[in-house]
Image (tube, rainbow, N blue to C red):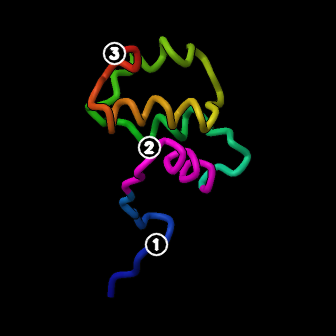
Amino acid sequence: MTSINPDHVVTIVSPDTLEELTELLESRWPDRRIPAAEFHQLVEGMPEINWRVWLSHTGLGRNWYNTREVAEVLWRVAYESTCDPDE
Protein backbone atom coordinates (compact mmCIF):
# COMPACT_ATOMS: atom_id res chain seq x y z
CA MET A 1 0.00 0.00 0.00
CA THR A 2 1.30 3.42 -0.95
CA SER A 3 0.69 6.40 1.26
CA ILE A 4 0.77 9.99 0.06
CA ASN A 5 2.57 12.59 2.10
CA PRO A 6 0.34 15.71 2.07
CA ASP A 7 3.48 17.87 2.16
CA HIS A 8 4.43 16.56 -1.28
CA VAL A 9 1.13 17.12 -3.06
CA VAL A 10 1.40 19.65 -5.86
CA THR A 11 -1.46 21.81 -7.04
CA ILE A 12 -1.08 23.56 -10.37
CA VAL A 13 -2.61 27.01 -10.49
CA SER A 14 -2.83 29.61 -13.21
CA PRO A 15 -3.46 33.08 -11.84
CA ASP A 16 -5.05 35.57 -14.20
CA THR A 17 -3.47 38.70 -12.74
CA LEU A 18 -0.35 39.83 -10.93
CA GLU A 19 -2.53 40.48 -7.90
CA GLU A 20 -3.78 36.87 -7.90
CA LEU A 21 -0.20 35.62 -8.10
CA THR A 22 0.76 37.86 -5.18
CA GLU A 23 -2.20 36.53 -3.19
CA LEU A 24 -1.14 32.95 -3.92
CA LEU A 25 2.36 33.66 -2.65
CA GLU A 26 0.96 35.39 0.42
CA SER A 27 -1.29 32.41 1.17
CA ARG A 28 1.88 30.29 1.36
CA TRP A 29 3.94 32.96 3.15
CA PRO A 30 1.45 35.14 5.09
CA ASP A 31 4.19 37.28 6.62
CA ARG A 32 5.08 38.30 3.03
CA ARG A 33 8.65 37.06 3.46
CA ILE A 34 9.84 34.14 1.36
CA PRO A 35 13.02 32.47 2.63
CA ALA A 36 15.53 32.75 -0.21
CA ALA A 37 16.84 29.18 0.19
CA GLU A 38 13.30 27.76 0.14
CA PHE A 39 12.40 29.78 -2.95
CA HIS A 40 15.57 28.70 -4.75
CA GLN A 41 14.72 25.04 -4.06
CA LEU A 42 11.17 25.50 -5.35
CA VAL A 43 12.24 26.97 -8.69
CA GLU A 44 15.49 25.05 -9.13
CA GLY A 45 15.78 23.78 -12.66
CA MET A 46 13.11 26.04 -14.14
CA PRO A 47 14.63 27.09 -17.46
CA GLU A 48 12.46 30.20 -17.53
CA ILE A 49 14.37 31.69 -14.59
CA ASN A 50 17.69 33.24 -15.49
CA TRP A 51 19.48 33.37 -12.13
CA ARG A 52 21.93 36.08 -13.19
CA VAL A 53 19.01 38.33 -14.10
CA TRP A 54 17.11 37.33 -10.95
CA LEU A 55 20.08 38.15 -8.71
CA SER A 56 20.71 41.43 -10.50
CA HIS A 57 17.16 42.50 -9.60
CA THR A 58 16.99 41.10 -6.09
CA GLY A 59 20.60 41.36 -4.92
CA LEU A 60 23.15 38.85 -3.74
CA GLY A 61 23.25 37.25 -0.35
CA ARG A 62 19.63 37.81 0.59
CA ASN A 63 17.94 35.67 3.21
CA TRP A 64 14.39 36.74 2.33
CA TYR A 65 12.38 37.97 -0.63
CA ASN A 66 9.24 40.06 -0.49
CA THR A 67 6.19 38.30 -1.96
CA ARG A 68 5.40 41.25 -4.22
CA GLU A 69 8.87 41.39 -5.77
CA VAL A 70 8.81 37.63 -6.40
CA ALA A 71 5.33 37.90 -7.94
CA GLU A 72 6.45 40.71 -10.26
CA VAL A 73 9.46 38.81 -11.57
CA LEU A 74 7.57 35.52 -11.91
CA TRP A 75 4.70 37.28 -13.68
CA ARG A 76 7.04 38.79 -16.23
CA VAL A 77 8.83 35.51 -16.82
CA ALA A 78 5.79 33.24 -16.91
CA TYR A 79 3.07 35.42 -18.36
CA GLU A 80 4.84 38.00 -20.43
CA SER A 81 7.22 35.41 -21.90
CA THR A 82 10.42 37.26 -21.11
CA CYS A 83 13.47 35.94 -19.33
CA ASP A 84 14.71 39.39 -18.40
CA PRO A 85 12.29 41.43 -16.26
CA ASP A 86 13.61 44.60 -17.92
CA GLU A 87 12.54 43.51 -21.40
Residue for point 40% across, 51% down: 16
Q: Is residue 81 found inside the magenta-colored segment of the image?
A: no
Q: Residue furthest right?
A: 31
Q: Main secondary structure of the magenta part?
A: helix
**Residue 84 pos. (x, y %):** 34, 18
| Disc assigned to residue 42 | 2
CA–CA distance between discs 1 and 2? 17 Å
Label 1, residues with CA under 10 Å away: few <14, some 14-19, many ≥20: few
The residue closer to the viewer here, 34 or 41, is: 34
Q: Identify whether 43 is placed above or below 4.
A: above
Q: Is residue 55 above or below residue 37?
A: above
From the viewer's perspective, is 56 left or right of 48? right
Three-letter code for the amino acid on which mark 1 is drawn: Asn
Please name the residue that numbered disc 1 is placed on.
5
Q: Amino acid at mark 3?
A: Glu
CA gap between label 3 and label 2 equals 24 Å
| Residue at 53% across, 33% down | 70
Q: Percent x, y for residue 18?
A: 48, 41
Comparing marks 3 and 1, which lies closer to the viewer? 3
Q: Secondary structure at mark 1?
A: loop
3 or 2: tag closer to the N-terminus: 2
What span is in magenta?
A: 14-27
Q: Which mark is residue 32?
A: none
Depicted 65 relative to depicted 15: above or below? above
Task: Tell me residue 13's x, y (percent).
Answer: 39, 58
Residue behind mark 3: 87
Q: Quadrant of the C terminus?
A: top left
For marks 3 and 1 on the same chain, the one whose residue lies earlier in the sequence: 1
Q: Amino acid at mark 2?
A: Leu
Give the secondary structure at mark 2. helix
- Up/down of 82 relative to 79, above or below: above
Task: Name which quarter of the figure residue 3 lies in.
Answer: bottom left
